[in-house]
Amino acid sequence: MRGQQRVVIGVDSSTQATKAVVVDAETGRIRGQGRAPHTVTGSDGARESDPEAWWSALGEAVAAGLKEAGADPSDVAGIAVAGQQHGLVVLNAAGRPLRDALLWNDTRSAPQAAALTAALGGPEAWLARTGSEPVASMTATKWQWLREHEPATAEAAAAVRLPHDFLTERLAGTAVTDPGDASGTLWYATTTGAYDPELLDLVGMEARLLPEVAPTGATRVGSLTPAAADALGLPVGIAVAAGTGDNMAAAVGLGLGGAGLLDHPVVSLGTSGTVFAASRTRPAAPGIAGFAAADGTYLPLGCTLNCTLAVDKVAALLGLDREDAEPGGAAVLLPYLDGERTPDLPHASGLLTGVRHDTTPRQLLGAAYEGAAFTVLRALDELLRACGLDPAAPEVRDRPLRLTGGGAQGRVWRDTVRRLSGRPVIVPHHTELVALGAAALAAGAATGADPVGIAAGWDTGEGEPLPALPRDRAAWDRIEGVLDRAAPTLLS
């Protein structure tokens, strides 16, 4: 690519916004970036967005990124999309949405998740096939909800897509997904690397409605169509990668995978809290999503619904700045304001206990941080076990956590994670890791090189090292005791 087309575009289409980065394909330097917001609607467990708005936002973000980069469109070699996982997009024969997409954090399909779990013979049967148990976030449960509550829409569907599939198809005109995002649907088996006919039959899904699964997220699945080129102001024929889910792209952006780091844990603090690691071990553990990665390895992942937004809500209720917090003392606050995914408590609400006369507002806010961080870190221990590792072993315990997401930039978040985990932390210098991972997929599509190797060469996972703090075992035990006693009675 040297001396010719020198930039690639990585797109992060998340719950709240689309971000696009224009990246130097040789060095990984971000030359420009753009952003356009999304609208999420719904209440009482419903969370929906118009997929057409994602496409409009993609165009706005790409245009802004190219403008900031000062790049000539003819310099662009490839483009890839990383999208929010699990969302259900149903299309008519013309490729237009029949309704707004049901998003990953829409919890209305909790009853369908329970019914599907039982229909196959219990959680173990699902883990053996897909690596994951049915929970309300997963796509198949949303499809079941749609079939039961809006049967006419389900019957009219000519195509079913994930959010990133929808956008990739708009770019390349090709109905395609990748193993990483497909593994979050519950109709894709990580044992075979393909859609599972029995599971498709179980949820009433016809294989003809689904996109083809490309070998990796960096596979070139087509070229930018004339219509897409016109919409984005780019030349026809640019390489389009299969793309992947946002968590898989973040792993690529951090250089995690077969050509990079394996079994190195990541804690991402955003709207949701996630923990993941690239591994060669196929995960099949309760409470952990046993995803495939974008590069052919696996990406076991734990996800909580309540993280930075929940803590910010508590700060707003208390009239405090988000950084104006101190350790919670005797107070325990489980900020499960949107239900919870891990642990699986879809109908939960927030729970506060242990308040004394001397409890301060700053301690209540600190307790919200602790409750959210504890929930994420307990999922981390389960994730490490799913990778065949002992979380308490010194060689595992001393391996630094890579702390990412918006919360990683906050002092209290950093200190809380370090205090509750007792682990060293690395905060990567780059904050747009999903978009950078997508850019590496785009570079892989344009060159045929391994995307994890590309990102590792860009050093996108390097960052500020923070030493371990003494572990606050008393706080950990206090929060764990409250959660174990309150679930499920007080949290259902």
Image: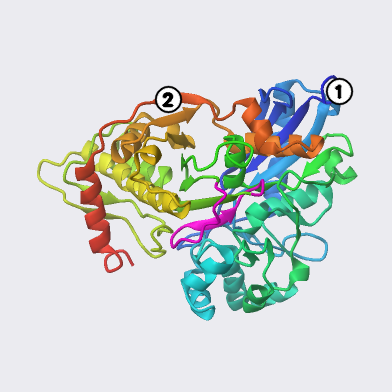
Residue 396, image quadrant: top left
Q: CA distance from mark 2 to mark 1?
A: 37 Å
Could you tell me if residue 309 is visible in this image?
yes
Q: Residue at x 27, y 65 (%)?
A: 490
Residue kind at label 1, given as amino acid type = Gln
Q: Earlier in the sequence, mark 2 or mark 1?
A: 1
Front-most of 267 and 286?
A: 286
Residue of label 1: 4
Q: Main secondary structure of the magenta part?
A: loop
Q: Residue at x 83, y 62 (%)?
A: 94
Residue of label 2: 465
Front-most of 116 and 336?
A: 116
Q: How far across and how far down the image is residue 118, in percent? A: 49, 78
**Residue 29 on the magenta segment:** no
The colour mode here is rainbow
Q: Is residue 124 left or right of residue 443?
A: left
Please rate how many residues cluster around mark 1, counting C-alpha atoms within 10 Å: few if below 14, some from 14 to 19, many from 20.
few
Residue kind at label 2, given as amino acid type = Pro
* Helix, strand or loop under label 2: strand
Residues in magenta? 279-296
Could you tell me if residue 14 is visible in this image?
no
